[in-house]
Image: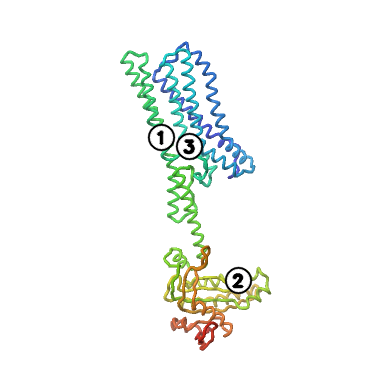
Amino acid sequence: MTRMTRRDAFRLKNRMLFANIISNAIGVGVVLFLIRHAGLPSVLPEAHRVMQVIHMIFLPFAFLLPIILVIGYERPIRSHLNREWTGQDISAEGLSQARRRLLNEPFVLIAVDFGIWLIAGIVYPAALWTCGAPHAFIMQPFFMNLFTGLITTAVAFFLLEHVLQRKLVPHFFPQGGLYMTPKTLRIRISTRIAALIFAANLVPFLAVLSITAGTFQDRTDPAQVLEQLRSTLFVNAILFMWVGVWLAFLVSGNLRRPLEDMIRVLQQVRNGRFDNKVRVTSNDEIGYTGDSINAMTDGLIERDLIKDTFGKYVAKEVRDEVLSGRTPLDGEKKEVTVLFSDLRNFTPMTEQNDPKLVVKMMNAYFKEMAEAIQEQKGLVLQFIGDEIYAVFGAPISRQDHPVRAFRAGLEMRRRLTGLNRQFEEKGWPGLRHGIGIHTGVALAANIGSPDRLSYLLVGDTVNLAARLQSLTKEVGTDMILSATTHAHLSPAERNAVHLKPLKNVSVKGKRNPVEVFAVL
């Protein structure tokens, strides 16, 4: 979290408290407005003094008690914000406790609000009862406080959620994950809808019944009753319609914003952009969906990273073919051309030169050789020490894989010549290598332990290619082809370089001599 100013800290610490005070003010204002236009009877003169005393005692109590309870409940939240503002260390336990309190705070405030108004609904009727007031006068403050509590609770439910989602949750949960916070109550979508129905229908209905019933008290003139009833119903309809529209605006906004954010992120994912995140501000079904979308984009980023890394070693089309799953990797026999390349006198060179220099030379060499192989759609299977193990025709089958391997070998020779020229200019030692190429049938599969697999080829074809690479040392050339590979070359390919047939050559691991061709 970034360092905040004192003003920012004050605002964040008191947003929920101010929102709760506003909710209670709206509830009181709505009820007083209804009572004023309903023409309900006032308190009896003899009970007026008692009511004034209760006002002086209860009203400060009703105002201060919720504030004290809220500040006490918010202590971990306020402590965390103070530490953040002053730059002190923030413990994981303290942050976790602050987050739990924050997510549960709307429910706590609603319970406190309704409890205070319920107490008022008991205290005032009890005071009137002790004064001997009639039943109708005793029930008036009871229903007035009950409706105030219901309206306040309904308004607070949505207003507190609005403040929580817009201001506090983005600060305390910048990465989302609200649903993973333990010991928290969840404001589900069904709960929101039920609360909206309650606020927009049931509360106005009960208020209309109560206030309408009050218009008949102490009135015998039918015309006066009907006129008062008409005025009361009109005022109630206008007022609750306005409250309903305002609550619907809050609810729709609380639901619309995260959905629009999800649509925005999904559209970018469809266009291949995975760096945007859904702003998760709730622990309900919408918040869980937002976190799931963020997890999906993280997976896509990781997949692209693996894909790009894989693409450093193989041609892009080979990479895409393997990752698509269209190529079987559980074992298949197929005709391929295997290429082995090995540096000459590499061990003495490592002993005679600085290790960092040797690493730079090897990286430059492998870079050039891998590019030469990939240009011909080959797959570099492994870098084994100073040796390169590559295959052509797998995992994607290609009819011209012997020709491609031959061209790759020639390009490797050409690139090494250019690389040595660069080394000479820098005063570095030169490199020499031997290349062996053979075409035949091999078993291709993902081979290894369950935790680590490698795409490899096994069989006599691989062994013979490795033997031909070693044979280059004996015959004094840097590239040898098997007769099988040579047979697949076109006359143009054969005439491109000087190929010298070497018959009756003994190869380690072979009983019978083999025919090979040296590239001179």
| Disc 1 secondary structure class | helix
Residue contact at pointers 1 and 2, CB within 8 angstroms = no
- Residue type indicated by callout 1: Leu
Q: Nearer the viewer, residue 249 or 138?
A: 138
Q: Position of residue 248 (x, y in %)?
A: 40, 35
Q: Residues within 10 Å of mark 1 (few under 14, many from 20)?
A: many
Q: Is residue 210 left or right of residue 283?
A: left
Looking at the image, is mark 1 or mark 2 nearer the viewer? 1
- Residue type indicated by callout 3: Glu
Quarter of the image with the N terminus is: top right
Q: Nearer the viewer, residue 78 or 5?
A: 78
Quarter of the image with the C terminus is: bottom right
Q: Where is mark 3, residue-wise?
A: 161
Q: Where is mark 1, residue-wise?
A: 196
Q: Position of residue 469 (x, y in %)?
A: 55, 79
Which of the marked residues, 3 or 2, is nearer the chain's N terminus?
3
| Furthest residue toward top | 46
Cα–Cα span, label 3 and label 1: 13 Å
| Furthest residue toward bottom | 504
Q: Where is mark 2, residue-wise?
A: 362
- Residue type indicated by callout 2: Met
